[in-house]
Amino acid sequence: MPRLLSLVVVLILALTFCAHNAAAQTGGLTSAQARRLVDGVVLDAPTRAAMNAVSGADPRDLALNRQILMQSDDLFPFQLPDKGITDQEKTGRCWLFAGLNILRHDVIKKLTLDDFELSQSYLAFWDRLEKANVFLEFMIEMRERDLLDRELDHLLDDPISDGGYWEYVVNLVEKYGVVPKSFMGETYGSANTGRMDYLLDALLRRDAARLRTLSAAGKSEADLREEKLLMLKDVARILVIHYGMPPAEFAWRAQDDSGHVSAPVVYTPQNFYREVVGVDLSDYVSLASYPIHPFGTHYEITLTRSMADKPNVDFVNIPEDDLQDIALRALLDSNRVWFGCDMSHDVYSKRGLMITGLYDYDELLGVSLGMDKEQRLDYRHSASNHAMVLTGVDLTDGKPRRWRVENSWGKEPGDDGFFTMSSEWFHDYVLNVIVPKKYLSREMRSAFDETPVTLPVWDPVWRSLPW
């Protein structure tokens, strides 16, 4: 019996050794190694204090650098006049709000209005219909691809969304015009798009399956396009139920800031854009600063067209300092500047602050989290996910120290909805700006004439846009 017991013990030890050895050979973590890692955390006074604090509070509140907070103000020697703030509510329409915020201020200035807002819902309605058509066109184009094809998988993963970019604004406005918000205001569905997204995604995925089934049964491309139009009727029905019916024409009159009321004039949305707004959006170009790709190069991104008959999103890539300099020149020349950025880092929404170093996680946790901009992009820790408008700047020796930012989150955060962004934050997290062509150097304008280098839609440049 003792001999048998000894054999059992030897066997158990051998199995344990083999298991540990196998774990080591395959990169696995043994239980002993895991225990040593945890036991290696010394519960000294700073660590205990951090553990006690973090276990009962948001780390952001604990890591907030109060010294930076106390040194921040919302005064700007140069700022363009403000007339109200907009609110995108629970949607990803920042790109659209930012675009229309540029247009509405031109109308306010031209007609000396006290306030004015263009209907974001009106353009969001047509944006959804156009995106549905683009998705179904891609399904027809890719009807013979394997369902695990990377591009097809990307499209099926997110058939339709709020997200967009500057070119989307341009395409929508030039095709469908604009209307004052009073003629198509917000509904519950337009301001809370999550459930509508779910319904449209379900509908479009169903239609994708139908198109592939019809194709497999021998239907031609022309037949599939006829079927697509029937499918879009269902999309239009869902949109009308959620948004209401977009106006085909309307009678508009305005009251200027002196109290004078104009005579009513009947407009179509297209006429209103041409005659009242009158901004040439085709004069604007997209500049970006992505250090993961060569500068001075013209790029386009696959699968990003917002309308089936429009090109993909494109931009010229330039160094961060040049991006900031061009934005400054355009702003000082009284142009509001649309920009896309990463709001995931160093943002304190309550006070409307965007300042590098605002959160000191390294000190709180005793662990360095630092990466440079290139690493953050390459390793998916940073992406452009919000669009806003530059409206003011604070200069020191001719260089921007801070920027004033018009957001679209309502009046509650920041200074009545306006944010303050440091120059360092701009350098680290602003990734693209939209400016009139005249502010570009000769080399930059020439780059736009070059055939663009194509980037895949999963490139970090495009990842996570709603922008």
Image: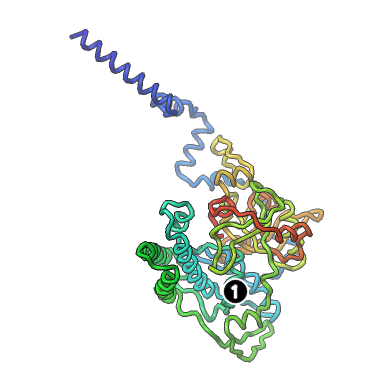
Residue 376 higher or lower than 77, as above or below: above
Which image quarter is the N terminus in? top left
Which image quarter is the C terminus in? bottom right
Residue at horizontal 48 percent and vertical 37 percent from the top = 51
Which picture quadrant has residue 432? bottom right
Circle 1: is it few (<14), some (14-19), or many (20+) Cα within 10 Å?
many
Helix, strand or loop at label 1? It is: helix
Residue 375 screen position, x and y as percent: 61, 42
**Amino acid under label 1?**
Val
Residue at horizontal 31 percent and vertical 20 percent from the top = 15
Residue at horizontal 29 percent and vertical 13 percent from the top = 10
Residue 353 higher or lower than 230, as above or below: above
Residue 235 in sight: no
Give the labeled residue for mark 1.
173
Tell which residue pokes out farthest to the top in this image: 3
Which picture quadrant has residue 194? bottom left
Residue 2 screen position, x and y as percent: 20, 8
Tell which residue pokes out farthest to the left in this image: 1
